[in-house]
Image (tube, rainbow, N blue to C red):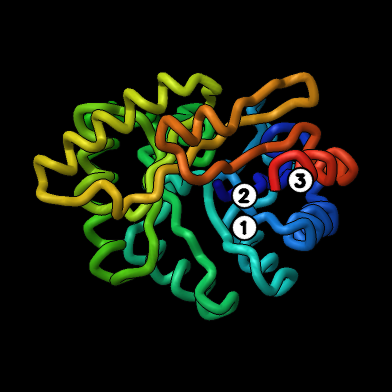
Amino acid sequence: MRFGIVLPQGWRGDLHGRDFETVAGVARRAEELGFDSVWLYDHLQTRDGDPGPVLECWTTMAALARETPRVRLGQIVTCALYRNAGLLAQMASTLDAASGDRVLLGVGAGWDEREYVDFEYGDALPPVRDRLAHLARTLQVLRARRGARPILVGGAGEKVLLRLVAEYADACNFTDSFDPAFYRHKLDVLRAHCHAVGRDDGEILKTASFTVREEDDVDFAAIAAAGIEYFIVYVDPPTDLARLEHFAATVL
């Protein structure tokens, strides 16, 4: 099992203002403790619509590349609707240049309609079918431009999204469940898609992301036995370094 940490960035009300120094401090401590990666959400405003305290994902990652020498840098996950695919590939390649090839490019179809409208991408979030078609085109461009560099696809849709994982991704991500049966089922579906496209599902890194609060009793071993190899954890509260240190002592 490997573990990454989701950093505070304001989207969840976990920063006072655009406090980059706190984010960088958590990232540095996570690296010192032995975590494999640090992650940011790709959100532009808080859940109640305030952009003020939120640090944008990719520009923050670029700064963190110069604050950390080792940890991988991931996005959980980049909304394919927010950036032209060619631009996104160029951004990731620039971040690789700044970090020594540490980018794990996470991408998904998007879901936050309020944010989409507030930032004037359109009058309404496109239907799921259109978002998935756009994600497919984005993945084609990213694969062509990024070559063998790793691409993670987030989402659990069984008919289309997991087939896109089988076709294009190096890693998948499922979210917000402590139930091993949930992951076992999703990975069975992914395995079937891999078989259909002639791919070994062992080539795909299986990841799970969720929030862990102090009172939560998470059986990481049971989830790993269901097939998850990599955990991306938002340790709540994320700015509490003592809490992060305690979590590290229990899992690393």
For residue 248, the mark is 3
* Front residue (pair 236, 229): 229
Hey, what amino acid is under mark 3? Ala
* Front residue (pair 98, 83): 98
Q: Which residue is mark 1?
A: 36
- The picture quadrant where one finds residue 243 is top right
- Dot 3 alpha-carbon crowd within 10 angstroms: few under 14, some 14 to 19, many 20 or more: some
Q: Residue at x 47, y 44 (%)?
A: 229
- SS class, disc 2: strand
**Left or right: where 34 falls relative to 190:** right
Tell me the distance, in whole angstroms, between the alpha carbons under discs 3 and 1.
Answer: 11 Å
- SS class, disc 3: helix
Q: Of marks 3 and 1, which one's residue comes earlier in the chain?
A: 1
Hey, what amino acid is under mark 1? Asp
- Contact between labelled residues 1 and 2, with CB atoms less than 8 Å apart: yes
- Dot 2 alpha-carbon crowd within 10 angstroms: few under 14, some 14 to 19, many 20 or more: many
* Front residue (pair 41, 203): 203
Is residue 73 shown above or below 246? below
Q: Of marks 2 and 1, which one's residue comes earlier in the chain?
A: 2
